[in-house]
């Protein structure tokens, strides 16, 4: 499995508050994640960097995972630790008060692939001709959709479409979705809402399956976000399967 990622400030923001990570440990497991910072000034930038730095440090200390339960417990523990660090830092500084970040990512092992999510950054998978969103947004609009109170089209233009119901570092405890996903995918995409919030899913699917060069795919996705206005920071990580990678 090969992975590549990049982040771009976009065309309108003064800072890039996104952070991303791709790291391999001694067991050849891969951790890849995207964090989209929230909070005024540089606070979102601080929160997303803190989350990525802590997850990287702890992952490199991990010599391998024994089973599904080991992965789940490790993620829950390390994400709570990151939450505590951001929450405590926020309490110390008036300028950083209320800062937080989304956090979405993949742990790829030789046996299985696991995903985790906090907030409204997303993971998509390509399974044959199907392009599937594998995460569920933690947002006010998503809750309205699930309750049947608005339609998908109304959600795209809802005035509170960017309001999160869950984020890392905002509260003293954090909820995280952790799942093992089905093998057999040819591509995985991890992205901030600077991509999926502006570029149509059919266009993302066309780009991610359009060519075999992983670097070109990543930059084409970033350029697609900028071509429709570049209103937000955008971060993209793509996994591509190689011969022998496919799993049932």
Image: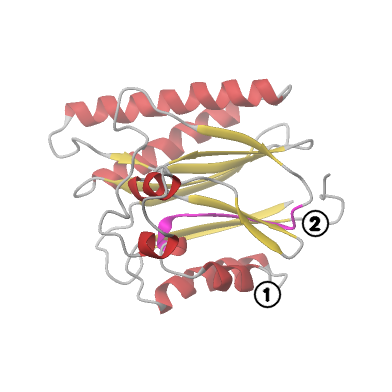
In percent of the image, x 33 and y 44: which residue is there? 164
Q: Quadrant of the C terminus?
A: top right
In percent of the image, x 65 and y 34: which residue is there? 25
Asked if residue 110 lies left or right of residue 162, the reply is right
The segment highlighted magenta reads: 185-194
Q: Which mark is residue 158?
A: none
Q: Position of residue 112 (x, y in %)?
A: 74, 37
SS for dot 2: loop
Q: Position of residue 126 (x, y in %)?
A: 69, 59
Please, which residue is most extreme toward the right here? 244
Q: Quadrant of residue 131?
A: bottom right
- Between 168 and 132, the one nearer to me in the picture: 132
Q: Position of residue 15 (x, y in %)?
A: 28, 58
Q: Is residue 30 visible?
A: no
Query: CA gap, disc 2 to disc 1?
Result: 16 Å
Q: Is residue 96 visible?
A: yes
Q: Position of residue 226 (x, y in %)?
A: 41, 74
Q: Is residue 78 above or below residue 157?
A: above
Q: Earlier in the sequence, mark 2 or mark 1?
A: 1
Asked if residue 94 lies left or right of residue 186, the reply is left
SS for dot 1: loop
Q: Is residue 199 above or below residue 58?
A: below
Q: Which residue is mark 2?
A: 242
Please, which residue is most extreme toward the bottom here? 227
Asked if residue 178 lies left or right of residue 149, the reply is right
Q: Which mark is residue 210?
A: 1
Q: Quadrant of residue 115?
A: top right
Foreground mark, 2 or 1, reads 1
């Amino acid at each position: 499995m090969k992975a590549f990622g990049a982040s771009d400030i976009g065309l309108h923001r003064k800072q890039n508050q996104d952070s991303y990570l791709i790291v391999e440990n001694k067991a050849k497991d891969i951790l890849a994640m995207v964090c989209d910072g929230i909070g005024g000034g540089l606070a979102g930038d601080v929160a997303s960097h803190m989350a990525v730095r802590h997850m990287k440090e702890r992952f490199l200390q991990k010599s391998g995972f024994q089973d599904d339960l080991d992965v789940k417990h490790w993620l829950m523990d390390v994400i709570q630790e990151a939450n505590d660090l951001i929450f405590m830092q926020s309490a110390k500084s008036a300028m950083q008060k209320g800062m937080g970040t989304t956090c979405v990512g993949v742990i790829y092992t030789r046996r299985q692939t696991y995903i985790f999510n906090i907030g409204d950054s997303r993971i998509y998978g390509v399974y044959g001709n199907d392009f599937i969103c594998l995460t569920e947004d933690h947002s006010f609009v998503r809750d309205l959709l699930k309750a049947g109170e608005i339609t998908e089209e109304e959600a795209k233009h809802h005035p509170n479409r960017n309001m999160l119901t869950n984020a890392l570092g905002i509260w003293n405890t954090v909820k995280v979705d952790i799942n093992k996903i089905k093998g057999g995918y040819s591509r995985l995409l991890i992205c901030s809402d600077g991509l999926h919030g502006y570029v149509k899913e059919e266009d993302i699917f066309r780009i991610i399956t359009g060519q075999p060069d992983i670097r070109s795919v990543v930059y084409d996705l970033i350029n697609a976000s900028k071509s429709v206005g570049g209103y937000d920071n955008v971060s993209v990580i793509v996994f591509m399967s190689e011969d022998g990678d496919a799993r049932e």
